Image: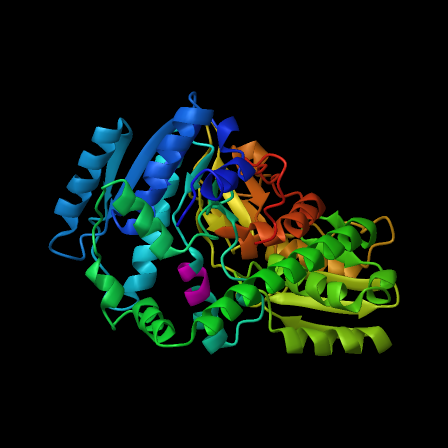
Amino acid sequence: MLNPEGDVFRSFSACGLEHCSSLVIAISGGSDSTALLLLLKDYRDRFARGTRLLAATVDHGLRPDSAAEAAAVADLAERLGIAHRTLRWTEPKPASGLAAAAREARYDFLAQAAREAAADAILTAHTAEDQAETVFMRMQRGQGFGLSGMAPATLLDSSVWILRPLLGARREELRSYLRQRNVGWIEDQSNVDVRWERARTRMELKSRPKAEFEKLLETARSNAALRSDLGRRAASLIRSHARQPESGLLHLAPALLETDSEAALYILRILIAVSGGAPRLPDEERTRALLMRAAVGPVRATLSRSLIASRRDGVWISREHRGLPAPGPAIDGMVWDGRFLIRAGDGAVPSLIAPAGASADAAKAGNGLPSSLLRSARACMPVFVPGASPAERGWTATPVLSPWSRFLPSFDLEVARAVAELTGAPGIPDLPCAGHNVTQA
């Protein structure tokens, strides 16, 4: 039997919820999210009376009963004295990739609701069953880092934290708690619809021995710990052995390649992705082969839209010239080439944005920087047309950490902060957690 004060309340406290001024709770009306809402309401009433709660239901409009279900959730929230919003996905639905599109829309709506409510975090009701299913699905795809499962905290769109305080809870425990409270829930038929991968996975795991379920959870825990440790080691090496002498040009000192080989490989994969504006890290084996070649002699290669040049003075990384965006209108809020967030200031002049190309400043490199690599890096930087600096035309171009621009799991928090410091990307918001290490599951 679930013990709210001994189990879930400890998780709420570990997340520092009593220190939050406002929270958004994602609730579909299913058993997991309904239990989260009740548990959080009880916790707030006892330990965090100043915390405002907003229950948010995303109605994707994919089932005939979805509007009625959202209304039922709104009624429950009203009875509990909690504010509620229904967020409706009214845009045309894609012909393929519907599940992924619905997931992205859900997070967009929740992020919007959190920003409008000035919330410290979004809480979701992912459970141990969700974690096991996630690891199982990723195993089928052979995903290495993905075997750490869902993080207890994830930064969404570089702005709002998602917290998952029920990752250690079992679904049947939550349902027993609801029965004890005499509160019902909605059974989502998509959970047994074999068209969806997660539904198929759920059915598959139910047919397997309980020991296999526990093994999946242990896989998540052990991989999360390894990933967090690797990130901390990589962060330390970045701070001591990496520099950015000029925007768009990164340098790794030779000593970095001679110390922690696993962390060095991780760093190289991250910085290649960041320099190239790639949403995912490059293939591990291809990067390992590149690192081994760099350890024994000069190398000049391209990978994941980045140029990597290994010389006696270290490894240099910048954007390669191929595949740069064509000139186009500068739009406030756009992400240019996966590398820069473009913003229009007050009085910004309408402009085109384009790679600098031949117009790049070919002035002396200075500070002993390799002139050819510097000119190449400058040619891949954004410029606003006609030729003026972004500031002169009222625009800013801020570096983006492309692999983490949508989701930054807390496993990667330390290394992401080190990369932000290195590249001049905006600082990463602090977790709303007090006295607890949420970088591990």
Describe residue 75's horizontal placement relative to residue 243 as left or right. left
Residue 27 seen in render? no
Point 30% across, 63% down: residue? 99
- Residue 380 as seen in the image, left or right of residue 407: right
Q: Is residue 23 left or right of residue 368?
A: left
Q: Measuring 46% from the left and 69% from the top, which residue is drawn there?
A: 213
**Residue 291 is inside the magenta segment:** no
Q: Of 377 and 41, which appears nearest the observer?
A: 41
Q: Residue at x 49, y 52 (%)?
A: 407
Magenta part of the chain: 129-133
* Label total for image: 0
Q: Main secondary structure of the magenta part?
A: helix
Can see residue 14?
yes
Q: Nearer the viewer, residue 93 or 66?
A: 66
On whether residue 132 falls in the magenta region, the answer is yes
Instruction: Work out whether residue 272 or residue 433 is closer to the camera in this orientation and state it.
Output: 433
* Residue 403 image offset from top left, x and y in percent: 55, 57
